Amino acid sequence: MASATLTNTTFDDTPVRIDVVPAAGDINGCTFQNANTSGKQEAIRFNISGTHVIEDATFSGNTTDLRFQHPSGTATVNLDDSTTDPTTEQDSTSRSWQLNERTTYDVNVKDSVGNEQNVRVYLENTSVAQEFSVLTDVNGDIAQQKVLRRDQEHTAGLPKTPPDETVHNPFILKMLKYGKIPIIITGKNFGETALVEAYIISDDAFATTAEATVEAYTGATVNGPAETITISVNRTLTEIYEFLKDWEADNPSEEDIPIMETNDGLNFTCKYDFIINTGITVTATNQDLTITNSKTFTINGTGDFTGSINDGTDFRVHLNITPLQTNTEIRVYDDLGGGSRGSELGGVENSSTSFDLIYTIVDPAVDQDMIVTLHHETGFEANPDIFLTAGKKNATLPVSQRPDRNYSNP
């Protein structure tokens, strides 16, 4: 049976063979059930090269659903929203063909007040290859997509059966927009029939600076392949977080999204190596940064991170000693136990009104025991040694220096 374009036609228990010819390559909305043909027992036979579409088809009870016979080149068939996976066969090793089984996919995205425009909806298959990357419109909808969930391919010159088969399930689905908490769904599977979904995307309470302002931030460089973040301009930790949220929305293929996270705006985690250039300060007032994924932090030269930072092995911490009388000599030693002093951890001969000690803990199971000595040559009593155990987070050591009532300035 040679066909014109077939639409919404059912073939049921009918000896039918449809030869797809160049003038009529599309077969839409047809059901192929218990069909067979003149002893060959195929529902549809493709005799030509080119691309053909079968939509909303049902295959049932056929010896062979799709047969590829004598195409002049490569026959490509896009099978959309079929209720079953068809059986395939070819009658010659000299023919090439490909069958793409696809699912129609529609998505709507809303936030707490209504439809959300310009959300990046990104789908990636098991080969870490982009399936599609589109933005939602004013109604929160994406343009309808065709998701390739399975394909079969036969190359001329190879044995007839079985064809090469690739299953693209499961997928990774991402929905990204600056100022919103990313939606990341791994293990996303598509079946035979069309899929329509709706999602609610929530506000990110810690990325609130205007997007145009964030896009103008400089001094933060992300290297995705190397998995590094390098800071070369003085920034706050919150600004770096906002920068990364904007960068992620523009780079949805990045595997480690979200790169930086926080639940409270105080405690942050980062999945990349975190590098601060010399002379650069990252201000992290009352904030902590933990580096995960076996990555590390590097603070070069006179660079600084004013919060506490750790990579699970090394902890870099600030201890602020205050208030001090100016020109106080401060020495901080490792406490070896029993009042015995070890190596000097830091100090200054003539202080200002406070002293910031930066120390590193290299054993995450052990805190830092230390001895603090204060000495002022003129007008203040000598302080006894201060013994303390300093932890892995920034802290303040309050001190008091009493005037020496017996001191007389000559």
Image (spheres, grey):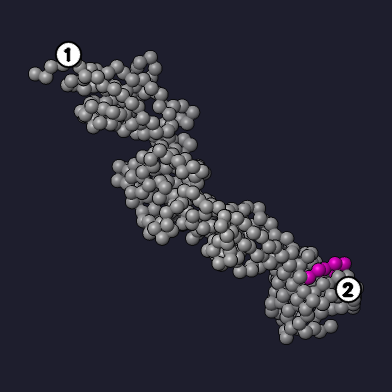
Residue 83 can be seen in this image: yes
Question: Which percent across, then down, holds residue 101?
Answer: 71, 67
The residue type indicated by label 1 comes to: Asn
Q: Is residue 264 above or below residue 30?
A: above
From the viewer's side, name the closer residue of 66 and 201: 201
Q: Which mark is residue 406?
A: 1
Residue 91 seen from this side: no
**Residue 89 on image: x %, y %:** 79, 70
Which stretch appears magenta?
57-64
* Amino acid marked by disc 2: Asp
Q: Is residue 153 above or below residue 404?
A: below
182 or 90: nearer the viewer: 182
Q: Is residue 61 magenta?
A: yes
Inspect the magenta stretch and tell me whether residue 234 lies in it. Answer: no
Q: Please say if 19 is above or below 145.
A: below
| Label 2 – label 1 distance at C-alpha | 113 Å
Tell which tag, 2 or 1, sits nearer the viewer: 1
Compare marks 2 and 1 and give the one earlier in the sequence: 2
Q: Residue 319 appears at what percent x and percent y?
A: 35, 31
Label 2 crowd bin: few (<14), some (14–19), many (20+), radius 10 Å = some
Look at 80% across and 74% down and name the residue there.
30
278 relative to 312, above or below? below
Q: Residue extending furthest front?
A: 113
Q: Secondary structure at mark 2?
A: strand
Q: Name the residue located 40 percent from the left edge and 27 percent from the top edge.
A: 390
* Quadrant of the image occupied by residue 121: bottom right
Disc 1 is placed on an element classified as loop
Q: Quadrant of the N terminus?
A: bottom right
| Res. 12 mark | 2
Q: Quadrant of the C terminus?
A: top left
Taking the spot 79% from the left edge, 76% from the top edge, the residue there is 8
